Amino acid sequence: MVLVQSDFHSKFICVMQKFLLVSFACAFGVNSLIAQSDSSMVSKPEFQIAHLPEIDELTAEFFTANRKKMRDTLPDSSMAVIFSASVKARSNDIDFPFHQDPDFYYFTGVREPDAMLVLFKEPIMVDKRQISEILFVEDKSDSKERWTGRMLGMDGAKRISGIETVLPNTDFKPMEFPWDRILKVYANKHQDIERDDVTHPGDLMSLSKHFKLKLNRAGLTAKVNEFEDLIAFLRQRKSEQEIMMLQRAIEITCEAQRNAMQSIKAGMTEYQVEALIEYTFRANGADGAAFPSIVAAGRNGAIMHYTSNNSLLFPGDLVVMDIGAQYEGYAADVTRTVPIDGKFTEEQAAIYQIVLDAQTVAARYATPGYKFWTPHEEAYRTIGKGLIKLGIITEWSEIGNYFIHGTSHYLGLDVHDAGLYTSLKPGDVITVEPGIYIPEGSPCDPKWWNIYVRIEDDLLITNGEARVLSDCVPKTIQDIESLMGELTD
């Protein structure tokens, strides 16, 4: 309906009358004014709390247990140091949202910058106290809290981490350690530090600099690569609490996939689909996206890490949705490829079925006793057979032209999580994600060009068959078409 000017004026006056009447009534508690007014004109506003999802939180006992695992693994007379992540500048004086170093989070639960964990194999005398671990954090500051939000401070960090000795980060510089009792020092591989506040003796740059100075004076060198392997070993096997966090992240991601499938139609943009997906994440209690959402329609499906998400969805094309919610720091990673029209073409269905068959075969080998790469080898073989059968390739050496990435990676606090990549063990959580990508101009029948399919699920390795944590979203051709068809039914 087009609103002419005179209609606009009359409706504007009516709205203003309603607004003033309700405002006056609310301000002075004059309920009778509302009761006496025309019910078609105004109604009493009602305040209702929105439904909020229940959030499962990791407790201090979880982080304490993780530190115990590390202490049990360290050699005698050793010390481990883990730095927090650094703040990253987005532009000028605006920073990217802070994302904690996964190792630091795993052992402390603290999600603030300019922090440092020092852990000893055996209790050691520091500042006339027997100490087994020290957490250095940024002390509370009224000024900083007004600008960037509330801070944990020492009491908050102690409550979250379960660490008894929590000190301001400025205390690290003058602190002396009994280096004669420390034979080995381990440290995490913290990222390049962009910012150096020369007026702050406890910022991350200062913590890192004075740690190196202390080591140099003691004649010691931090073992970084060895420590990365040790942490990968500890983080690879997921505890029951971690599996719960991962399962919740995956369930939220599956709901986002289903919502997207039921909403997609030609003429939408990729970023509209992305917005729906990430709205679903936040509406269900997720921290947000675990990685930039990939919504790749048509030819964009050829780009593995496509994140522009600014193209239109055209009739007849497929759209690859590689997405994952982050919940309490833990990442999901679930991919579905669906037809924009709600129904696969004959050629799309043929390619899709090969990928689905490859994933099914790969999952059978996601069991203890097999190497980490065995599922990939089996998926690769299945895709090769399928492509040869369709006449797309004639030689095994050509498979790599259309299946260009690995089938699996570990999943946890990182979407590509820490792990040793040796043999599969119960408690590992991995992805299984084969794909076929046939760019325009490929040396095959043009009817196959611009078909891009990836299917990804998250699997928990058990003592028997792997448990598919992401089986809460359709992936067969029939089930996808059925769900997408509900939009028009």
Image (cartoon, helix red, strand yellow):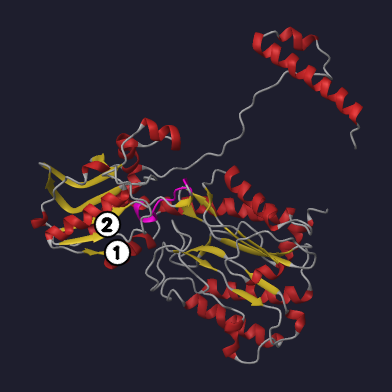
Nearest the eye: 252 or 439: 439
The residue labelled by disc 2 is 70
In the current view of this chain or complex, which residue is farthest to the bottom?
395
Three-letter amino acid code of the residue under disc 2: Met
Element at label 2: helix
Relative image position of residue 156 (x, y in whole percent): 34, 36
Horizontally, residue 71 falls left or right of residue 306, namely: left
Instruction: Tell me what residue is drawn at x 43 percent, y 56 percent.
Output: 413
Whichever of callouts 2 and 1 sits on the residue coming sooner in the sequence is: 2
Q: CA distance from mark 2 to mark 1?
A: 8 Å
Q: Which residues are magenta?
A: 93-104
Relative image position of residue 29 (x, y in whole percent): 66, 9
In the current view of this chain or complex, which residue is farthest to the left?
180
Element at label 1: helix
Horizontally, residue 190 falls left or right of residue 445, namely: left
The residue labelled by disc 1 is 230
Q: Are marks 2 and 1 in contact (CB under 8 Å)?
A: yes
